[in-house]
Amino acid sequence: MWRWLHPYAKGEASYRLLGRWLPWLTGSAVLTMMVGLIWGLFYAPPDYQQGDSYRIIYIHVPAAIFSMGTYTAMAIAALIALVWQIRTAEWAIAAIAPVGAVLTFIALFTGAVWGKPMWGTWWEWDARLTSQLILLFLYLGVIALYHAFSDSRTGAKAAGILALVGVVNVPIIHYSVYWWNTLHQGATITKFEKPSMATSMLIPLLICLLGFALMTAAFICQRLRNEILRQELHRDWAQQELN
Amino acid sequence: MIKASTWQVVKTLMRRDLKVALRRRSDIINPLLFVLMVVSLFPLAVGPGPDVLGRIAAGVIWVTALLAALLGSERLFRDDYLDGSLEQMILLPVPLPVLALAKIAIHWLLSGLPLVILAPLAALLLKLPVEGWSTLLLTLLLGTPILSALTAIGAALTVSLGRGGALLSLLLLPLFIPLLIFAAAAVEGALVGAPVVGQVVLLAGLMVLTLTLAPLAVAGAIRVSVN
Amino acid sequence: MAFSSWTEVISMGGYGFYVWLSFGISLAALAALMVHGILTRRSLQQQSKQQQQRQQRLARRKQQERSR
């Protein structure tokens, strides 16, 4: 397996591999997203409690799930970069962080907008919203640290250490915020009990989940390719690729 | 060649750091003054009534402690980095995480411990009810080592940047959040007479976890920053 | 189809503003991410072109000096 994986530690080989994946990922992502979102928006039945406002779930839940998933992916890339000194993994940190930050922002924003009709306020210090907000801060920290160094290798390694520190902290933060929330549960929140979703609502959600997964992979692919080119700009193959 | 044991090296390093720090006393005193001033701003802003002040006192003291920890944090490795002793530390035949732990200990002695000693005065100014005092001190005693350890990680990551100030706060404040939640909740629990053993044990566990893992992260960060 | 007319789709049972706001902003954010990626590639292309031109200039100058 190592002999098979080894060439991809180098920029050019992984660039070509990603280039082969990118069109398939993009195409299937656009297709599944369209099917899932249109199904969710127009064909899924309205919720008996929340009416049509629950349709926000088709963006909110996938974004929230993959905002944490990409953080894990980033931490794994950081571990590989720090332990085996593989440059592709270093660039992957820089490629994954902005995608994760955008997903976290979407989860936060849709959560807040959904909160307005449901809780009667744009921002509620709800446990899930709060821990998403902190996750956004963690992402922004990684991005800021990466760009603070003029030498991108040092930047990637420093950002990698921060991502690893963060991944140890994410569960602690998550549970502390939940615990804090149950302690301070405001009286005004009328939380809906977690309903067991009807199949007719669940299927489009699953399609949306798949769509977001594919889309996240496609975005990471695109950004990683850019990052590889940026770092290898002085090489001949990169010059040929760009002209 | 003189062979020095790890403990001897650590002892020498700590003694040197203490000596250097004690020569620049203002670096130790200024964060404490900052805490006192911020604490005395709150009654001016929200009014001096004990019902409001007493309720927010523990939270204010803890938030101020977090900010004070950020204040001096840039200096933690800066001088060692500039005069090259950080490189020497990497070359020593002593595991780097051990040296990092020594650095954290010194930082706590010079910033955490004075804060714990100052806390009763801050509590007095903010009219924290007496029932909360012992818990506040206990949480500070358990929490300030965590602050020092996390600060050391951030300082080691940004030491080669030369202008890490705002960036450092951006990196560190999210990591401080669990500490803030548990510590403030413990004091609040003590004020209403609830048992606080749970939170205190959680804080102690958090401290042990942080002090075990943070030296590794600091050592990694120093290696990245120096080369 | 859960709706019988387009006005119903737009009003979303009274929640239209919230639903369309969150869908709109989310899609806009994703589009911005994609556009940023494409623009990055374009600026890399420009950088590489500049680099090549510089190299050619240098090579030409060297040749001129040699011929002189």
Image (cartoon, coloured by chain):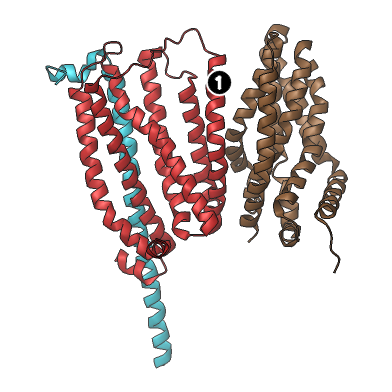
Kind of residue sitting beneath label 1: Trp
Q: At x 37% / y 77%, what residue is drawn?
A: C56
Residue B150 against residue A190 in the figure, above or below = below
Write down which chain is painted brown: B
Q: Nearer the viewer, residue B64 or A52?
A: A52
User: As rendered, which of A161 and B161 lies closer to the eye?
Assistant: A161
Q: C15 left or right of A86?
A: left
Report helix, strand or loop for mark 1.
Answer: helix
Is residue B47 at all visible to an observer of this figure?
no
Image quadrant assignment for residue B201: top right
Q: Colour of chain C?
A: cyan
Q: Is residue A95 left or right of residue B9?
A: left
When the figure is inspected, residue A239 is found, relative to residue A201, above or below; the finding is below
Find residue B71 and report its horizontal and vertical position in percent: 70, 37
Query: Residue placed at 29% from the left, 19% from the top?
Result: A197
Outermost left residue = C4
Relative horizontal placement of residue B183, taking residue A72 as reference (left or right)? right
Quarter that holds the N terminus of chain A: bottom left
Q: Residue at x 73, y 22 (%)?
A: B39
At label 1, counting other C-alpha atoms closer than 10 Å, the crowd grade (few under 14, some 14-19, many 20 or more) is some
**Chain on which label 1 sits:** A
Q: Which chain is red?
A: A
- In the displayed structure, does residue B211 sit left or right of residue A219? right
Can the viewer see residue B22? yes
Q: Which residue is mark 1?
A: A179
Residue that lies at the very extreme toward the front in this rendered image: A1
The percent coordinates of residue A174 (x first, y second) are 52, 28
